[in-house]
Image (cartoon, coloured by chain):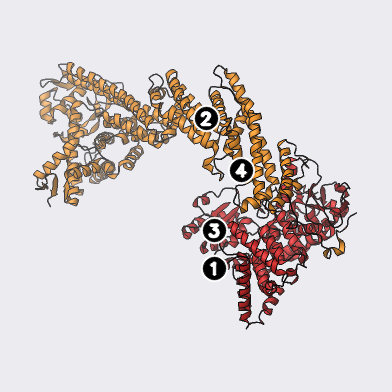
Chain colours: A red, B orange
Amino acid sequence: MSLSIGLRGQPHALIDLLKSQQARMRKSSLSDRLVGITQLKPHHLSERQSTDREIIASLCGHYEIVEFLLESGAQCDRDTFQGERAVYSALNDRIRQLLLRYDYSVAMDRNQPYAALITSLLSSEVTCSGLTGIVLPRPMGDTILELEKHGSKYKVHSFVLAARSEYFRNSIIHERETQKPELMLPSNTTSHAISCMLKYMYLHDTDTIPWNDGLADPTLLARSFGISGLHETVGQGKKRQQKRATTIETAQQDFLRLWNQYLNIPLSLSCHEHFSPDKLDSRLQSLRPDVILRVESQQDGLVYFYGAHKAVLQSDFICTAIRFKERFQKINANDSNPVLISVDVSPWIMESILKWFYTDTVDIEPGYALDLLMAADMLLSDRLKTRACLLISTQDRDDLLTGDLGYSVFDVARAGWVTGMSLKLDPFCARFLASRLEHCLDTASVFRPQLEELIKESAERIESREETDTVELVDDIRYYLNERFRMRFDALPEGMFSDTEEQGELFLDPDQKRMDIASETPRTNSDEYARLMADLDKLLETLGLDI
Amino acid sequence: MSSKPGGAGRIKIRPPRRGLANDFMKFDEAWGLLSEALQQIYERDASNLSFEELYRTAYKMVLKKHGDALYNSVNDLVKERLRRVTATQLKPTRPTFAAGSSAIERRESGNRFLASVKQAWEDHQLCLGMITDILMYLDRVYCNDNKKPSIQAVGMSLFRDNVLRNVDYDIGADLNRVLLEQMQMERDGDVIDRARIRSCVYMLEGLYETLDEREDQKVYLTKFEGAFLDASDKFYTEEARKLIEVCDAATYIERTNDRLNEEWERTQSTISTLTEPKIRAIVEQRLITENIREVMQLEASGLNFMLDNDRFEQLKLLYELVRRVDTHVNEIRRMLKDRIVHLGKEINKGVYSFRKAAVSADASGEPSTVEDKTVHAETLMALRWVEDVLALKDKIDKIWLCSFESDQGVQQTISKAFAEFINDNRRSPEYISLFVDENIKKGLKGKTEAEVDSVLDKAIVLFRYIQDKDIFERYYKKHLSKRLILGRSVSNDVERAMISKFKVEVGYSFTSKMEGMFKDMNVSQDLTTEYKKHLANLHSEDPTIDLDIKVLTSTFWPWSSMGGEATHTCTYPTELEKIRASFQQFYLRRHNGRQLTWQPQMGTADVRATFKARKYEINVATYALVILLQFNDPDSESLTYNEIKTLTSIPESELIRHLQSLAVAPRTRVLIKQPMSRDVKPTDKFSFNANFTSKQLKFKIGTVKSMGNKVETDKERKETEDKVDESRAHLIEAAIVRTMKARKTLKHSDLMLQITEQLSKRFMPDPGMIKKRVESLIEREYLERDTKDPNTYIYLA
């Protein structure tokens, strides 16, 4: 059932059209979903025989249609790319309210891409193409679940099962022979229960899992397979959003445990030792890694090997490297040996990246955030770049000026330019510099030449682009200087950050608040503002930038 | 074996960071590494390359602002490589196109050339794929930031410019030529390597004229397709000429169909599907549009031949072909119509020539008997005409169904053609009515309801074609009236079904009188019963005569054709007169003020007559009964014609006819005539034939020229036509007055249009007749001419 709706014409005519099809829709409405925007051409309505089972509704302001579709049982399934679009593009507040009434979250769910990544392993309907530019076919499972009684078979991923179920963790890591791809299931399980359970483990939208028909008892399953959080999600009364959030959070904890206990076990060899997959830790081997990431440590001269799964990779570099080797160098064409990819980062950066792949969490010392950004850029992983920038731009510490943190604010600005993240990092650097401008402008200060250098580079950037006469960095600094002396608590400029996700973060950042409160004290001192502005002009003059 | 890198202290001791400003890099060195790898890729020796290292090198070069140089160097390298491939691999396989080379040689050399082009293209794609993988960071970051076309796009354009359009060797032109040559070979029946050609076509489809890769700028479209279409056009112009010279129509259309399929298949398997509509248009233009007419007109095998010989398959194919170029298949329709009209006129011709012969025989022989004979023969003729027309209709309908996919437009054409020749025969309304008459009287016995229905439907189909429906109506009423009065219908249900079919076709006004006739029949039946009851109540002393009366409303029945308009004097013998008067009294008492006119010429009577041998029961006409009753008086030995005439006052013509049937007709000679001759003369004497015998106890004495429905004689026909004209005149006048009353003033031409439109359902009014009616109405001061504009009429209230 495919129904794409783009509403430039008369919504009522379309509703009538839809109503006329309603009888048929109802029959299949279990799988009808409200997704995405785009356009509705009336001829799409007549092509309802096509195989996709989706309703693509344009929500471009047509309240009536959205309401009608929701009443007709359409689901706004955010697990799909189109489903997200439907929510994000709810263009006006009325529709946003309507969606909320039907319990669909409008704010961006930052867990969504991660959940989609996992779900897409089980369901071909779910896409995760937004995550990487290189779309490898989603890896089929490495393990076959076999149900003795019914003969049903499921292709699953041993790392997902091991993460999410204690039962499978034991049988995969501790009991199974590594060579055997089959896993037998207790004979008292029904195939329906298994498919429900798998959907839960692969983070399908909780509400779409057909628990309620009595064939699967979630509590029993949770107990016998040791699945955490399962029974809680099934109970009635909780809001859909809330259930969803809990489910994903549980999954992240599951994967985090898997990562800490069984995945983050790198094999270290000296540079002349030969690598072979069976030298890996046996626990890791039992999780059947299909890719080995090799990094060299400058520090101890050792070479580290991390086992990982293609299924979670979110780096175009790694994906391309795998493809290159498989396609052009016929590596791993037939044997089951994992592909070996060398990555030019330090081991702990590699660890952070892998941890992010598996758990969608980044926790790294602030001092390494810039390294993470550079690595993410090299690995062509845009989402990770955004996360790294978020980490960097929430710092407000003096050692960022001195460089004692490991990098300085000047490094941050340059890194932003190099990695194409200047939209996110430039405002941060300008604000940071504005807040400590007196230190930088001091002629005796060691930071002054650094600032001069940075302003020169910024000016060159603009020249080469020939877009405008002003120096972006200086404009930004002036802006934030003004902000600083206007001493408004909510000093953050609207729209300066394009990403709403970050905006929310910044409000909550305690450092940020502290800074704003601190800047309230010299409220009366507008002289200082004038002095700083004059000094900045002087500096520009000496640089020959007459702006 | 495993350990955490750095351990607990790893946060404190930071390794030197790499990748930023502190890491210098020489372009030449890095490029040296990369270019060597690219060479290896081109040498198909990529297995030892380290993807990671090459990627990292390119990544660093972009980071160090060497993106521009790297981008250009890679492109130069690719360009260089392609030039060398062209010179070393493609040039040696270039075909010579020497004049004297044989077809096999040419095919072989073409094949070799295509193989090497294909090889070069596939190598290029493979290598370019690897290069873009390695240079992915360059593509993503450098090309994106600087709005440069991707390595892939540039690689494609380099292939186009340095291989196909190499300044030294015009590979592109060679390729076009070889491709066309191979296509030609296939058209001539040779087997070619389609897959190989297709991969070369794919190559042309994958290349674009510009870097923005617009879909309409495919090299395939800009450089190859035009040449292919030109060559095809030339080929099919010639092909059409050859085919028409040597083939008959069936072969021509088969070959055309084969060619169309062949070209379609070519677009699916050998060249691009993009070309499909264009090449199809060429074949259709050359083989169908320009020549199909000539093919259809071929004497011995064309459309007429196919129609005559029921070549359903050929006709179907022909129809499909023509419909490709003309959805209305006008050419087929035109010829089909001509053929149907031709065949129909052949059927008409039989009738005409028969009539001609009849007329000449009429002139020479004795008038009355010959007339009788011809009338009988012509009735058979009429029935055969209808059957022939229906047979033609069946044949054409089958072709329409089997070959013309029940095309609505073709159906219209068929209808027009039938209408044309059916109306060409001016007697067709009469014939068709006769056909119905015949079938209702005889043919329908023992047939199932469905069969009856289908016969009637056939009649309706023909009825539809008749233009002068009023003439048909006249005949039908005439025939119907006789059936009703003589009780000849097989079943009333069938009659009513027929009438309701007419009603569906042309509406209530057409059938109201016919329905009235049915009503009369029913009312008469009741009346007869009641009259009998009445008689029983009276205890009438004379119950011997059983009267079955039919009271006909004069406006419903076709009086004139029933002879009702002539005076039918008759002096009834007393016994008859008594009962006549009794009924008249009875009837007029019930319906005061009505006028009953007796029509003895239409009645019949059952008589029990006693001869010497035995008693017989004879069915005779009322007039014959009156005559016979004159001989009831045993005193009168014989009566002369004149005596009979005086006694009965039967009109002369009727009297003669009935005397003939009583005294002349061989098997029913109940009277003796003296002298014994066919003609009845006023001096002839008649006497009762007491010695009469017959094999049957019950028999019927028919009237000479009986009441049965036969074709009209010319004289009758003339009368009918006059009657028709008269009633048409009334209808036209009524229509004029109706229209003018509503419109008050109207121009002549508008009036003509209105009248024609109003009446065309019943008949096609003759403009001259309309004019005459207008004149007459002006004379009678219903209308006047506008004094300013003599072409405008004004209604006078």
Marks 2 and 4, the one that precedes in the sequence: 4
Under circle 4, the secondary element is helix
Disc 2 is attached to a residue of which chain?
B
Confirm whether residue B582 shows in the render: no
Distance CA(mark 3)–CA(mark 2): 43 Å
Disc 1 is attached to a residue of which chain?
A
Most foreground residue, A332 or A438:
A438
- Mark 4: amino acid: Val
Q: Are marks 4 and 1 in contact (CB under 8 Å)?
A: no
- Determine the residue located farthest toward the right in the rendered image: B1
Disc 4 is attached to a residue of which chain?
B
| Residue that mark 3 sits on | A58
Residue drawn at x 29%, y 21% as measured from the top left: B350
Distance CA(mark 2)–CA(mark 4): 34 Å
The part of the image, by quadrant, that contains residue B698 is top left
| Residue that mark 1 sits on | A94
Dot 3: within a 10 Å radius of its alpha carbon, few (fewer than 14), some, or many (20 or more) residues?
many
| Residue that mark 4 sits on | B154
Judge left or right: residue B129 versus residue B98: right
Image coordinates for residue A487, horizontal then vertical, percent: 63, 79
- Mark 2: amino acid: Glu
Mark nearest the camera among 4 and 1 is 4
Under circle 1, the secondary element is helix
Mark nearest the camera among 1 and 2 is 2
Most foreground residue, A317 or A430:
A430
Distance CA(mark 4)–CA(mark 1): 49 Å
